[in-house]
Amino acid sequence: MGWNKPKYSKRAVNRAGVSLVNESCSEVELNEALGVINNWRTSHQFPLNTFQIRLRREAKKIDDNCLIGQRIKRLSSIKSKLERIQGLNLAQIQDIGGCRAIVNNMTALKNLTEVYTSRSSRGLKHTLFSMDDYVFDKPRFTGYRSIHLVYKYQSDKSKIYNSLKIEIQFRTLLQHAWATAVETIDSFTGQNLKLGGGEQDWRRFFALMSSVIALTEGTPVVPDTSKELELLRNEIIVLEKKLEIINMLGGFNAALQFTGEDQFKRGGYFLLTLDTVKRVVDIIQYPRNSKGLKEASEKYLKAEKDNRFTTKNIVLVTSDTLDTLRLTYPNYYADTSRFISILHEVISGTVQLSLFP
């Protein structure tokens, strides 16, 4: 497969990042910057594929039913991150390319984390640049849970990609269900709960639900929430009634229409566009080869440019099957059924606490 290679210096990449967030930038300057940024993004596909292959192999040994996904960071997310973090340069962003393993339970999550942090992993040429443990060590105040590892790619054969950073995430199905619900609410209501913004009641609700999941998985609760399941339950019931959360989440999915799914035959690159106003999800598939990747990357950039003043959510991802696509990226389908099931258990008082040590 012919992979894209970096064509610009990091200085040029950083200048392009400055132009991306500069509201007074001319259309010509912005287009030039987007060309540089798109090359920088697509150059991460080769090292990302390398890490994804190993992640799939290691995760499947531990949990044969795990889900593996990979994606290149959205232009809107890059812009938001550069605006949010003062002094951050585009070339410093660690998750331009990212892959994720979603495992069934905490035992699998712990075992997979140990594989990547044990002495045996130190023999890898790739350098572990950083690790953030938002599950066992320091749960975020938002309730977000996942294990994040950032690696610097290093190879004797493909030196042109050396030092490009790839982020790997591990999370359980319950943690994934929580994150999907947060992203779905953000998409359809315009809040920013994922990053700690949004309305206070919604922030509190998701923090409480994350603590419930933590108790079921045997991990620390979110700061400023109770460690007592019944106290969490009582507060959740009040907020669910006030916000009508179950009806709202179920309504998002019920109202969606899908275009393009009937054309899928096998896995490949998928360009997903969620229009939250028209309630339509458009899916375009490209073959998993160099021609398909090139076309998909070009269409990805064009779609982002054409819709940068709209509320559409656009992402380019890789998946083996349509079913895996739905399970790995359910927020683009507004599929919060697993989260709603957990919420029903909380309200009915049937949630089981974990025996996980």
Image: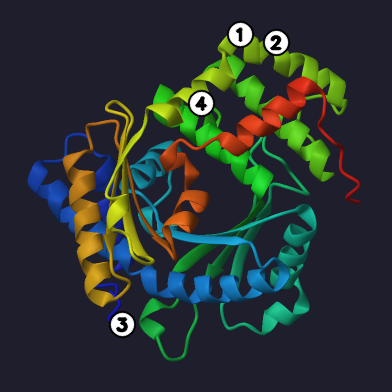
In the image, is 103 to the left or to the right of 250? right
Amino acid type at circle 4 is: Gly
Mark before the other along the chain sequence, 1 or 4: 1
Q: CA distance from mark 2 to mark 1?
A: 6 Å
**Of helix, strand and loop, which one carries label 3?**
loop
Which is nearer the eye, 355 or 98? 355
Where residue 76 sits, quadrant-wise, is top left
Neighbourhood count class around disc 2 (C-alpha, 10 Å): few under 14, some 14–19, many 20 upward: few
**Of helix, strand and loop, which one carries label 4?**
helix
Colour convention: rainbow
Neighbourhood count class around disc 1 (C-alpha, 10 Å): few under 14, some 14–19, many 20 upward: few
Rendered image: mark on residue 250: 4
Rendered image: mark on residue 238: 2
Please give the name of the residue rendered at 71% of the width and 66% of the height, measured from the top-left corner: 112
- For disc 3, the marked residue is 1
- For disc 1, the marked residue is 242
Which is nearer the eye, 344 or 7? 344
Amino acid type at circle 3 is: Met
Please give the name of the residue rendered at 29% of the width and 31% of the height, measured from the top-left corner: 311
The quadrant of the rendering that contains the N terminus is: bottom left
Is 342 drawn above or below residue 273 in the view shown?
A: above
Q: Which tag is nearer the camera, tag 1 or tag 4? A: 4
